[in-house]
Amino acid sequence: MNHRILTISREFGSGGRTIGRHAAEKLGIPCYDSELIQKIAQESGFSEDYVRTADESAHSFPAAALASRAFGPSVDDHLWQIQSHVILDLAERESCVIVGRCADYILRDRADCLTAFIHADPAFRAKRIVEVYGEREAAPEQRIREKDKRRAAYHRFYTDMKWGHAKNYHICLNSGVLGIDTCAEILCRLF
C-alpha cells in the first residue's frame, strides 16, 4: 500500500516544526520530529540527547568528520544508516509528516513524497525563537546563524546537496510572510 509522506526541512526559528504538526493534525496523520529521535535512539542504543545533537557535531567540521572515516564508518555514519532505515520504514508503514533529519533526501526516490523547505527572514526568526522557544534575547541572530550552519553542514555531508536550495524541494514557503497557519494549509492542499 502506498502512503503519502510530507517532509519538512526548515531554517531554525522559521516555524517548520509547528507547521509540520499543524499539517499533520489537519490531515489526521502522525508527525515525526522528537518521536523520530526516540525511534532512532531505541534502534541504535544511543541516548536521545546524542541522537538529537548528532547533526550538530562533527559535521560542522567536515575535514574532521572525513578524517575519522580513515578507519571505517564512524559512529555518526552508523547513526545515519539507522536514521535512514527508520525513515524508510515509517514511509512504508503509514502516511505521515517527517520534520528534518534529511528525510527529503532519504525519500527522494518516492513519488508519494512531497518535500518542503520553510524559511523566513532573520528578524522574524529571532523574534520567534525568543518568544516560542525561550531563547535568550541577547544574541538570537547568532544562535540562528550557528544552528543553520550546522544543519547545512550535516545535510551537505550526507546528501551532497545544498540545504535550503529551492531546486532541491517541491515547494519553499516563507513563513514570515505567509504565516504559520497559511503554510500548513498550503501543504495540506498539496498533499
Image (cartoon, grey):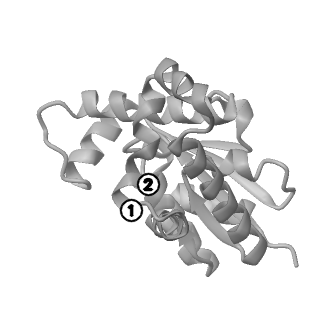
| Closer-to-camera residue (58/2) | 58
Q: Residue furthest top?
A: 63
- Image position of 65 with respect to 33: above or below: above
The quadrant of the rendering that contains the N terminus is bottom right
Residue that badge 2 annotates: 51
Say left or right for 10 vs 94. Answer: left
Residue in the image at 52% along x and 43% along y: 76
Q: How many marks?
A: 2
The quadrant of the rendering that contains the C terminus is bottom right
Q: Amino acid at mark 2?
A: Val
Query: Residue 143: which quarter of the image?
Result: top left
- Image position of 46 with respect to 179: above or below: below
- Image position of 131 with respect to 173: above or below: below
Q: Position of residue 161 (x, y in %)?
A: 68, 29
Q: Do the numbered discs 2 and 1 sit on residues whose CB atoms are within 8 Å?
A: yes
Residue that badge 1 annotates: 48
Q: Classify mark 2: residues with Cα within 10 Å, few (<14), some (14-19) or many (20+).
A: many
